[in-house]
Image (cartoon, rainbow, N blue to C red):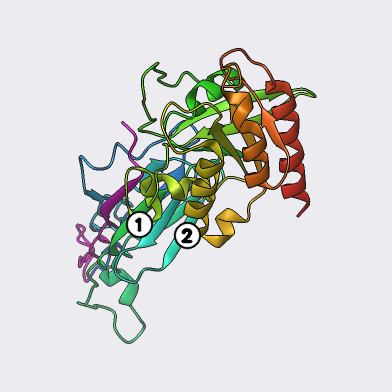
Amino acid sequence: MFIDEATLKVKGGKGGDGCRSFRKEKYVSRGGPDGGNGGDGGSVRLRANPNMSTLMDFPSRTVYAAEDGVRGRGKKMDGRRGESLTLDVPPGTLVRDKDTGMILRDLTEPYETVLVARGGKGGRGNASFATPTNRAPQQYEEGEKGEERTILLELKLIADIGLVGLPNAGKSTLLSHLSDAHPKIASYPFTTLEPQLGIAEIEGYRRVVLADLPGLIEGAHEGHGLGDEFLKHIERTRAICHVVDAAPLTPPAPAEAYRMIRNELRQYSPALAAKPHVVAANKMDLTEAAENLDALRAAAGGLVYPISAVTGAGLRELTIALVKELDHAVGD
């Protein structure tokens, strides 16, 4: 199951109380104060774990608390510090404070961490209050409460290239042929329900991360279909590959399908629509596909790469074009 949003409450541990104690030994009169300090409470951190790809571990539990610090003891023995808690999340997780809306950290790098709830400071024991004029202090401090906050986690997949298109355009088949991914593929009208990642090995020992996004439908930016939930994942990509069915069984025609997807991207985010993109006319192994190619080229206003994800025709030329777009994106 792919989960890309989660809400959880995090609590730093309470600091341990300081101790009020006086030295008591045989033959020692008026032993001085020897109350130790309380240990600090543990803190809660998030860490980007490159081995994770979903937030599915969090919905089953909503409160995460670090350990409290231990109370100080006599003989100036300080209490133990509470154990901190580190929660692993996938790279690409945006961490936001629910109450203020402030972004705490965008965890994009592997093993990057962010402190989300600081533990409370331990209280001082009465030995810390001794002075030349106050040799028998009675006062001590209670430990401070740890920070508490509710945070929102939003996962945006990190990929070099996002494959976008209408349902049944052949994106999953293309991903399986370009990379080591094994997405679900069917011969009937079927759309990807969860984003899929794959790594393509490119000539020159380059690796490119591809993301197959669920098929978009008209009105996706307004919440229609599944597309709106996953459009945000395209924001992380550096380039886009429009996969268009060149021989659709039902409308829209390829040219109209391309215009529809471009409009959805513009409506969702002008910055997203401005990303470098390549157009792939898929299913060119079907006879009626050639009839639609010129109209698609006119709609795209530029070069269209005819391919067949099933037979592998044109895939080498497409990957070369995608790498060029990536290099341009890096240069910008």
Image spot of residue 34 (x, y percent):
28, 64
Image spot of residue 204 (x, y percent):
80, 24
Q: Which residue is mark 1?
A: 222
Which of the image's four quarters has the N terminus?
Answer: top left
Residue segment shown in magenta: 1-30
The residue depicted at 35 percent of the width and 33 percent of the height is: 193
Q: Quadrant of residue 222?
A: bottom left
Give the amino acid type for the residue marked by disc 2 in the picture: Gln
Label 2 secondary element: helix
- Residue farthest along the top direction in this orientation: 311
Q: Which residue is mark 2?
A: 267
196 vs 325: above or below: above
Q: Main secondary structure of the magenta part?
A: loop
Asked if residue 11 lies in the magenta stretch, the reply is yes
Depth check: give the residue in front, 292 or 69: 292
Q: Is residue 83 visible?
A: no
172 vs 120: above or below: above
Depth check: give the residue in front, 150 or 241: 241
Image spot of residue 289 (x, y percent):
58, 24
Callout 2–callout 1 Cβ contact below 8 Å: yes
* Label 2, residues with CA under 10 Å away: few <14, some 14-19, many ≥20: some
The residue depicted at 76 percent of the width and 47 percent of the height is: 328
Asked if residue 232 lies in the magenta stretch, the reply is no
